[in-house]
Image: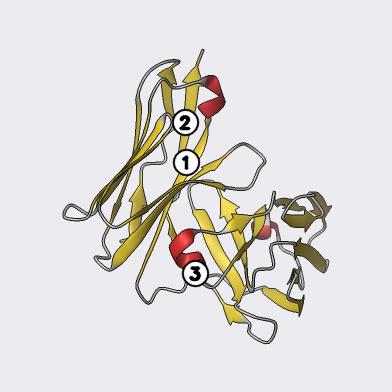
Amino acid sequence: DADVTQTPRNRITKTGKRIMLECSQTKGHDRMYWYRQDPGLGLRLIYYSFDVKDINKGEISDGYSVSRQAQAKFSLSLESAIPNQTALYFCATSDLDGANYGYTFGSGTRLTVV
Amino acid sequence: QKEVEQDPGPLSVPEGAIVSLNCTYSNSAFQYFMWYRQYSRKGPELLMYTYSSGNKEDGRFTAQVDKSSKYISLFIRDSQPSDSATYLCAMSGFGNEKLTFGTGTRLTIIP
């Protein structure tokens, strides 16, 4: 099994619908992150959590919310999806030194909002 | 201006060539430098990690950091079609809690 698992892998949804993307990890890491990736814009941080009781906004949090249900689970919600939220979404994890030694990424969720 | 600049490419080179990928940065506090490789429809995976200045070699890959110029490079020797991917640089410094990523360079190795 993958260290960081994202579900679903692909999703098409309609404008205005609520959608949840899920992430689970077996790395035992405390820190988890949600990014979106768009062509030409690279990875942009949406939200991050340094432990179960900690939630922080990233650079593009508007229109998104998160829930850290357990150390191993971090979900991302789009409350009312819009077409410009069409993107590739990645969950990542790290230990306390993640900024110094790197993150582990999931395989991504390709989301299309029509 | 972004903290980390990376030419998005695309870059196409023939098989066997030496590939040079580069990033520049503006934050002099950056001390930790990484290169990620991302295959199509996959998540980024950590390829190389370097602390401070100098070179690090791993097989066909060499990571180079020049802090005086705020410039990092990844060299790929004897490039193979399997090296075709997007390469992202990432970095952080003392007191940084998160990585700062470049936008990625898309590389294609032509057989």
Label 3 lies in what chain?
A
Tell which tag, 2 or 3, sits nearer the viewer: 3
Residue wearing tag 2: B107
Say which mark, if any, is on residue A97. 3
Q: Does the CB distance between marks 2 and 1 fall below 8 Å? A: yes
Amino acid marked by disc 1: Tyr
Residue A37 in the image, given as x and y percentages of width and height = 58, 53
Quadrant of the rendered image containing residue A35? bottom right
Which residue is at a point 51% across and 12% down the rendered structure image? B111
Q: Which chain is disc 1 placed on?
A: B
Q: In this view, does A103 lie above or below B66?
A: below
For mark 2, give the secondary structure: strand
Q: Is residue A14 above or below residue B80?
A: below
Query: Element at badge 3?
Result: loop
* For the residues bearing labels 2 and 3, Cβ distance under 8 angstroms: no
Give the class, few, some or many, for how many residues have Cα within 10 Å of label 2's Cα (few <14, many ≥20).
Answer: many
State the residue lying farthest toward the bottom: A53
